[in-house]
Image (cartoon, rainbow, N blue to C red):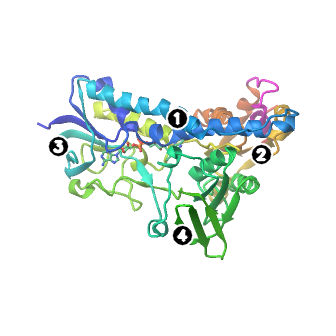
Amino acid sequence: MADYDLAIIGTGSGNSLVTPDFDGKRVAIIESGAFGGTCLNVGCIPTKMFVYAAEVAATVSHAGVFGIDARLEGVRWRDLRDRVFGRIDPISAGGQAYRVESENTTVFAGHAVFTGPRSLRVSTGEQFSAEQIVIATGGRPMVPEVVTQSGVAFETSDTIMRLDELPKRLVILGGGYISAEFAHVFSALGVEVSVVARGTRLLRHLDSEISDRFTQVAATRWDLHLGVETDKLSGDQRGVRLDFTDGSCAEADVLLVATGRVPNTDRLGLAAAGIQTLSDGRVKVDCHGRTNVEGVWALGDVSSDFQLKHVANHEARVIAHNLAHPRDLREFDHRYVPSAVFTAPQIASVGWTEDQVRAAGLNYVTATQAYGDTAYGWAMEDHTGICKLIADPGTGLLLGAHLMGYQASNLIQPLIQAMSFGQRVPELARGQYWIHPALMEVVENALLKLGLNEP
Ligand code: FAD
């Protein structure tokens, strides 16, 4: 008999696998870092708490447009930081204490490695077996060799939010969503921000129209170095300098490396268990979350195509069911996975990009509605926000939705809902009231502009 019924490696979404189905059973939980994982400690939640504060600061800075005289007199960085982590750290500690005290769970505060198909060793010395094991080890920031070999001091998303002082100048290496969110936070708080990326556009994973427009807006706020390779980093206690292959350079007090993330599989001893991985290092799973080794499952960033908390949570719900119901396995639903970038302007998207539908040879129509051409947009003096929709004229169904602007992550929800439940554009646009003059009229107008409405 195995020592445990279930062993969970990683307490991000893995922590939610301990459902009432495991009451009276023996569950081992192994965590090498902060309890609660990336989202709670160094990811979604603290970043969005900083983003909100940044938006308060930006609102003050832009108040003059509305005839309101206000000035951002200062930012108490330590107070801001301590408000965020004063909320988060106790939640992490409380979550751990709850599991330590629970009758059916045993917490191991260490790093787990496989020693066989269903056996583990923890860095704290314990070794045990389990009937079923779930790998929920997430990922970590990837730091390029050019940075590590330079010996220059740098921050990652794991550390930057805990700085003691707000820098005067920040240079961010990377052009993805983590870079865009931190660039927004720090620039709104008064820091001079430079962004360095190999690509010629920021947020290249998005619909290219959104990515282009965002890059244009970003260029008005941040010092952009796009289409460049960093070939030399130098620095001392006073700051850092990055030299690029095109002869230009960027200097700052602090360097943030945001060049992507790698799955936490390389230090897991997967070979000892015979667990297969994909070419990028993620654990290979089927639609039920099973690895190739019986009784071993994986979820979230360590295995998923999507590096998103709501996907990790969904996968955890499916696996929690499957662990307890081996004869009634559920499948992951990855059909309409939305995502948002909490930068400025905020961005949200779901479904296909126009490049993807074009490349797939699909018949499609698009419509774009500017925030600034609606009544609420006038109130906001919005000049950059858009809602772009892509639909199939044959079926009347939405194929993709891409919003850039205030509260895009909320405005997109009816479109996600329509796609998820197969609701057609004509019903969605005209089968309900839309509150006037709410900002949601941006979405209503974009739907009407698709020209798929029945009389
Ligand atoms: P994690 O939460 O990373 O949990 C893995 C856990 O496993 C960690 O606690 C780790 O310490 C532990 N671990 C690893 N290896 C071992 C081992 N060998 N032994 C024991 N323990 C181990 N997603 C969104 O949807 N929205 C957002 O706004 C968003 N913002 C983000 C902002 C930032 C800066 C970052 C970095 C990420 C953000 N994400 C966001 C992504 C989101 O945080 C992840 O998709 C999600 O947290 C993944 O959850 P997980 O359970 O797969 O892994």
Q: CA distance from mark 2 to mark 3?
A: 59 Å
Please, is residue 156 above or below residue 227 in the view? above
Quarter of the image where ligand 1 sits:
top left
Q: CA distance from mark 1 to mark 4?
A: 31 Å
Residue 13: x and y, percent? 40, 37
Q: CA distance from mark 1 to mark 2?
A: 44 Å
- For badge 3, the amino acid type reads Glu
Q: CA distance from mark 1 to mark 3?
A: 36 Å
- For badge 1, the amino acid type reads Asp
Please, is residue 435 above or below residue 342 in the view? above
Residue 395: x and y, percent? 67, 41
Q: Nearer the viewer, residue 166 or 49?
A: 166
- Residue identified by numbered label 1: 82
Q: Quadrant of the N terminus?
A: top left
Where residue 234 is drawn, which disc sits there? 4
- Residue identified by numbered label 3: 126
Q: CA distance from mark 3 to mark 4?
A: 43 Å
Evaluate whether residue 402 shows in this view.
no
| Residues rendered magenta in the picture | 432-446
- Mark sitting earlier along the chain (2/4): 4
Q: Nearer the viewer, mark 1 or mark 3?
A: 1
- Mark sitting earlier along the chain (1/4): 1
Please, is residue 240 above or below residue 334 in the view? below
- For badge 4, the amino acid type reads Ser
